[in-house]
Image (tube, coloured by chain):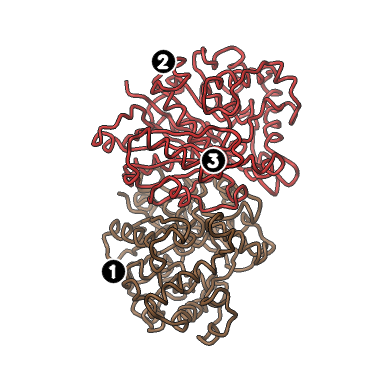
Chain colours: A red, B brown
Amino acid sequence: MQPVRIAGVGLTPLGRHPSRTGRDLFGEAAEAAFADADVPRADVDRLCLGNFVGDVAENQGHQGPLMADAAGITAPATRFENACAAGGSAVRGAVRSIRGGDADVVLVGGVETLTDLGTPRATEALAMAADDLFESRIGVTFPGAYALMARAYLEEHGGTREDLAAISVKNHANAVDNEYAQFRREITVDDVLDAPTIADPLGLYDSCPVTDGAAAAVLVSESYAAENDLSAPVNVTGSGQGGDSLALQDRADLTRTPAAERAAADAYEEAGITAGDVDVAEVHDCFTIAEVLAIESLGFYDSGGGIRAAADGETTADGARPVNLSGGLKAKGHPVGATGVAQLVELTRLLRGDHPMSDAVADASVGVAHNAGGTVASAVVHVVEVDA
Amino acid sequence: MQPVRIAGVGLTPLGRHPSRTGRDLFGEAAEAAFADADVPRADVDRLCLGNFVGDVAENQGHQGPLMADAAGITAPATRFENACAAGGSAVRGAVRSIRGGDADVVLVGGVETLTDLGTPRATEALAMAADDLFESRIGVTFPGAYALMARAYLEEHGGTREDLAAISVKNHANAVDNEYAQFRREITVDDVLDAPTIADPLGLYDSCPVTDGAAAAVLVSESYAAENDLSAPVNVTGSGQGGDSLALQDRADLTRTPAAERAAADAYEEAGITAGDVDVAEVHDCFTIAEVLAIESLGFYDSGGGIRAAADGETTADGARPVNLSGGLKAKGHPVGATGVAQLVELTRLLRGDHPMSDAVADASVGVAHNAGGTVASAVVHVVEVDA
C-alpha cells in the first residue's frame, strides 16, 4: 500500500473561545495547515472531518461541507463520528483514502465548541457518547464511568491516588511550553489530591477540561509529495481501529480496553513494528486512569503494570518513553472531535523537531497516537514515523 | 480494484414506530440482512453506519458501537454523517474498505427515528442539515429551501406544478406493492395539487414524510464470495461523491446540483459505464423537484430537460428507465440516515428479481443509487450491476 505523508499541520489555541463558531475555528486551523504544507487548496481531493456534538452545541449537523467552505476548498467532505474518537476516525478515513488510491491530497480535521454550553449541558452532551438507555439516563456521566473503571483497576491491580496524580502532574508540566495548550502551568501531587472530588476516586485534576478548538492536517500520497518536492518527513505507517460494547455493563473486564488493544495490534502490524519500537506517544487521557489503560493497551506495559509509569518517571519528558509531551487532554485540552487530529499535529511537530518539547525526543523516530471514544467502545491508533 | 458483492440486504417496515428505539430497528434490519446473506456475524470485519440526528432524536451519539451491539457483532464501527446522505456515505465507506483490502466483510447500515419528535421538532432537527447561521436561523426549513430551488428551476426552464405532481403520483403508484413502504396507496395529480401548500410551489404531496426505520446490507469481497460459495449476483461497480457549499446563498445556480453531477461522473467512470447504460435508478426525491434535479445530474436528461420525465411516462414503472420503483422517499419513506442504504437494498432486490417490482425491470442489468444531503451540498452515487 502507498505510504501517507503528513505535509502540514495546524491547530488553534485550545481553551475557551466564547465568541467564536466552529467554522471560524476550523478555518484558522486549516489555514495554518495549508501554510505549513505549502499545498494549494485546489489540489485537495477530499475532507475527512471529526466532530462529536455539533448538532447540540451549535444546532449544526452536516459539518462536512460547512467546514470545507470554511477551509476554502470545494472537495467532497464527510463527517466521521465516534464520540471522542471522531478525530482519529477521520484520520483513519483520510489515510485509507490515500492508501486505497482514491485521493492524493486529503485535508483531515476536527472541530468542537463546547464551553458555551456551560458545564451542566456540556456534561450532558458528552454523555451522548455513553448508552442513553442503560447509562446516561440512570445518571452515569463520563467522570462516573471512568471512576468505575478506576475503582476496578485499583482493586484488581493496586495503585494509589498518588500514582494517578503523577500523571496529571506530568501532563501539566509538559504543557507549560505548548503555545496551544489550555493550561500552561505546573501543578503538584498535593494540588491533585486536594482538588474537589468529582467521582471517587477521581478529582477535578484527574479530569480533562471542556475545550473549544480545531485541528487540521494535510495528508498526501508519496507520489504527490515527490512530484511537488514537498518537505514532509513524517509518515503515517500504520492505522488500526477496534470496537467494544457501548455500555460498561456489557464488558467482561473493566480493567482493560480490548478495543484499543486491537487497534494497536493492527496498527503495529501494518507499520511492521512492535510496542518496543515506539519512542513517544500521545494518548487519550480524558481522565488519569485513562492514560494508564492507554499505555497498557499500547503494549508498553502488561495489564496492571502501567499504574506507576508516570510516578516512576518512565513516561515523563525525561523518561525512557515520554507520553503526552503536548500536555495531553488533561492540560493541552480536549476539543473532542479535534482531539485525534491534534494528536497527529503534536506528533508531527515533535518528530520534525519544531515542537517546544522536541528536545525531549531528539532521537525519536516512531510515534503513536491513541484516540478513544466513550469508555473505549471505539479506539483508533496510528503509527507515525519520521524519515531517517 | 476488488469488486464488491452484495451478499444480503435487510429493511424494516418504514413509517411510524413510536414504541421502538433506533437500536431495536437496526437489529431487525441487520438480522434480515444476515439471514439473506447467509454470512456468519463472526466474519464481519467492520460496521459502517449512517445516522443523521440521533443526538437530538434519542440523546444518542456514538451509535457505531451501539448498533454493532444491536447487530450482534464485535467489529470496529464508525458513524458517517452527511445529513440525508449519511447512508450513502456509509455505503461508500464500506465499498472503499473492501476495495482497499482492509476488509472482506462489511455490514453497512443506517437508522433514524424521527416521528417521536413530532413535526415541529423533527423539522428543526432536519434543518441541522442546512447552515444554522445563514439559513436555519432566518427561518429556512427544507421545504422552503427546495421551494426556492423549484421556483428557480421553473422560472429558468419552464414546467408546471402538474409536471411535479406526476412525480409524486408515479412514486405512490410504485409503492403500492412494496411491503416496506410507508404509503401504499395511489394518489392523483389532483390530490397533489389540492393538498395544502407547504412552501410555494411545493405542497404536502410534493414532500416526503418523516419516517422511522433502518436498513442494512452485507457487502463482501469477490474472494470471500467465491471461497464461501455465496449467491451474491449484484455488485457495486462504481462509487462517487461530490460536495458543494452548504448554504444555498453561496451557489452560483439553484437549478443544478453539481455535487451530484460530480458524484455521478466519478461513479460512472469507475464502473466504466455512461448514463445511457443505466436501466433503473433510485434517487433522492425528498421533494418532487429533487427528483428532477437528480435525474438531470445523473445525466439521464440535460439540465432543464427532466421536468416532464414522469408526466411523459419515461420514468414510470412501464417507462424506458424507471426511477424510484421502490416508491422513493416520497412514498416508501425517508428514514434519513438509512435512506442511502435502503436504496441499495431496493436495487439489489430489483436486479436479483425478488422485488415486487422486479418485473418492470426484467432485462435490467445496471442500477444507480443517488443519495443527497441538505440542498445537495453532499451527494453520493453508486452503480450496481447484476451478473449476466
Percent x, y of residue A21: 55, 45
| Residue type at tag 2 | Ala
- Is the same chain shared between marks 1 and 3? no
Cα separation between marks 3 and 2? 30 Å
- Element type where label 2 sits in the image: loop
User: For the point 59% across and 67% down, which residue is it?
Assistant: B210
Asked if residue B206 is positioned above or below residue A22 in the image, the reply reads: below
Q: Nearer the viewer, residue A221 or A380?
A: A221
Q: Chain of mark 2?
A: A
Q: Chain of mark 3?
A: A
CB atoms of marks 3 and 2 within 8 Å: no
Outermost residue toward the front in this view: A19
Disc 3 target residue: A337
Percent x, y of residue B19: 69, 62
Q: Nearer the viewer, residue A286 or A134?
A: A286
User: The C terminus of chain B lies in which quarter of the figure?
Assistant: bottom left
- Badge 3 local density, few (<14 within 10 Å), some, or many (20+)? many
User: For the point 75% across and 42% down, which residue is it?
Assistant: A139
- On residue B277, which mark appears? 1
Cα separation between marks 1 and 3? 42 Å
Q: Earlier in the sequence, mark 3 or mark 2?
A: 3
| Residue type at tag 3 | Gly
User: For the point 46% across and 53% down, which residue is it?
Assistant: B90
Disc 2 target residue: A362
Labels 1, 3: front one: 3
- Element type where label 3 sits in the image: helix
Labels 1, 2: front one: 2
- Badge 1 local density, few (<14 within 10 Å), some, or many (20+)? some
